[in-house]
């Protein structure tokens, strides 16, 4: 496990806990973004007065004079989507930038006609900004540096906008997956990811249910993973571990494996055989004279579901207050990079 300076970690954990508690009140907003140039994941928290940007080894807070709601980052430059009011009281949409290296900040674009939904936002390398119209969640808006606004209407509700490579815009809708490149819209899939995606490195996106997606020339495409034909595509074996998604029951696992009751049994962490209920991390699976240990990524307490207790335990693992066992180490490494870090904590904070 990577050792991270406790002072920085403590600051990040405080921000995470604070943001999780205040989001329900509407007092502040927070989001997780990744800079693909440096493979750095940031937690960004902002309210009406201040903006906070945190990573494994960086933390800054600066005053905010606009009402900011969403954020994206490329090559150390953060762009925020928000609004302010002119002297006549008219609302105007603002794209605000902050350079994490120099501390410089400025307004990139201002438009008085744009009206945005605050939860979908992406930016390209040439500072074109993409967001969803407040009045029509099927309309993709593009705001250029000179303040020019363009609108493209898609089929289905827009659930997420991603501009991972700084060039191609991936738009995930309820109707399918679209790409926007050089102002041309193309539908590339009828089956988009169902869950929000978060960056894990410069080439990979990971859905919160544990499914993987890779970029090929700026386009999202599913990984083709090799799994035995008799297994469910959501259930995989990795050495002595059986990786299952959250919510899988004992009966569902048995059916997915095509196992007969006489050749299949489950034992809890106290070696007590159980016949029904949900699987939890650390349970023992005996199947066809072989033994595997169940692992649910993010589920650390063997309760079978991800909750705040898992988040608190992950924090203790990162700060060194507690040491995970072999199974917990596997389950806590959500982004599969071989270490338990704040990146895993950020992913876990979105999973329950």
Image: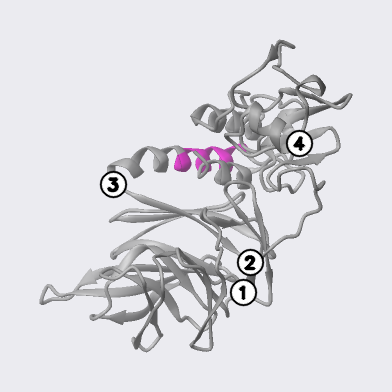
What percent of the width, then of the height, locates residue 238? Answer: 82, 40
Residue, x 49% and y 30% (percent of image)? 308
Nearer the observer, disc 3 or disc 4?
A: 4
- Residue range highlighted in magenta: 6-16
Q: Which of 58 and 193 lies nearest the eye of the viewer?
A: 193
Disc 3: which residue = 27
**Residue 9 appears in the figure:** yes
Residue for badge 1: 165
Helix or strand or loop: what does disc 4 sit on?
helix
Say whether disc 1 or disc 4 marks the residue closer to the N-terminus: 1
Q: How far apart are the two marked residues, 1 and 4, measured between alpha carbons? A: 39 Å
Tag 3 near tag 4, CB within 8 Å: no
Residue located 24% across and 81% down the image = 113
**Marks 3/2: CA–CA distance:** 30 Å
Instruction: Tell which circle, 3 or 4, labels the residue nearer the N-terminal end.
Output: 3
Can residue 280 be seen here? The reply is: no
Say if mark 1 contacts mark 4, CB within 8 Å: no
- The image quarter containing residue 242 is top right
Q: Secondary structure at mark 3?
A: loop
Residue 111 image offset from top left, x and y in percent: 28, 81
Residue 271 in the image: above or below residue 84: above
Crowd class of label 3 (few under 14; some 14 to 19; many from 20; radius 10 Å): few
Horizontal arrangement in the rendering, residue 199 relative to residue 307 (left or right): right
Mark before the other along the chain sequence, 4 or 2: 2
* Residue 68, position as x, y percentages in the image: 33, 62
Task: Point out the frontmost of discs 1 and 4.
Answer: 4
Position of 183 relative to 349 (above/below): below
Gap between marks 3 and 4, in whole Å?
47 Å
- Magenta-drawn stretch contains 9: yes
């Amino acid at each position: 496990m990577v050792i991270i300076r406790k002072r920085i970690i403590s600051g990040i954990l405080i921000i995470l806990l604070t943001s999780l508690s205040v989001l329900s009140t509407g007092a502040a907003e927070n989001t997780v973004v990744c800079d693909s140039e440096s493979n750095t994941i940031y937690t960004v928290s902002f309210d009406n007065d201040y903006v906070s940007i945190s990573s494994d080894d960086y933390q800054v807070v600066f005053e905010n004079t606009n009402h900011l709601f969403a954020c994206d980052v490329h090559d150390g430059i953060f762009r925020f989507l928000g609004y302010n009011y002119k002297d006549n009281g008219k609302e105007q949409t603002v794209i605000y930038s902050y350079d994490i290296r120099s501390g410089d900040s400025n307004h990139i674009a201002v438009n008085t006609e744009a009206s945005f939904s605050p939860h979908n936002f992406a930016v390209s390398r040439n500072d074109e900004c993409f967001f969803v119209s407040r009045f029509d969640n099927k309309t993709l808006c593009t705001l250029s540096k000179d303040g020019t606004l363009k609108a493209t209407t898609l089929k289905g509700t827009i659930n997420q906008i991603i501009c991972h490579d700084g060039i191609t815009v991936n738009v995930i809708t309820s109707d399918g997956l679209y790409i926007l490149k050089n102002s041309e819209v193309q539908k590339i899939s009828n089956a988009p990811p169902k869950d929000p995606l978060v960056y894990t490195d410069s080439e990979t996106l990971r859905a919160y249910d544990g499914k993987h997606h890779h970029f090929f020339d700026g386009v999202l495409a599913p990984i083709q993973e090799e799994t035995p034909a008799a297994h469910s595509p959501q259930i995989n074996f990795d050495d002595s571990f059986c990786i299952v998604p959250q919510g899988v029951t004992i009966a569902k696992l048995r059916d997915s494996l095509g196992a007969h009751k006489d050749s299949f049994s489950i034992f809890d962490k106290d070696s007590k055989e159980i016949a029904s209920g949900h699987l939890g991390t650390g349970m023992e699976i005996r199947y066809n004279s072989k033994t595997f240990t169940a692992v649910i990524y993010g589920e650390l307490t063997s309760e079978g579901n991800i909750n705040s207790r898992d988040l608190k335990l992950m924090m203790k693992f990162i700060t060194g207050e507690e040491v995970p066992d072999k199974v917990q180490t596997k389950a806590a490494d959500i982004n599969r990079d071989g270490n338990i870090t704040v990146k895993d904590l950020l992913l876990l904070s979105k999973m329950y």
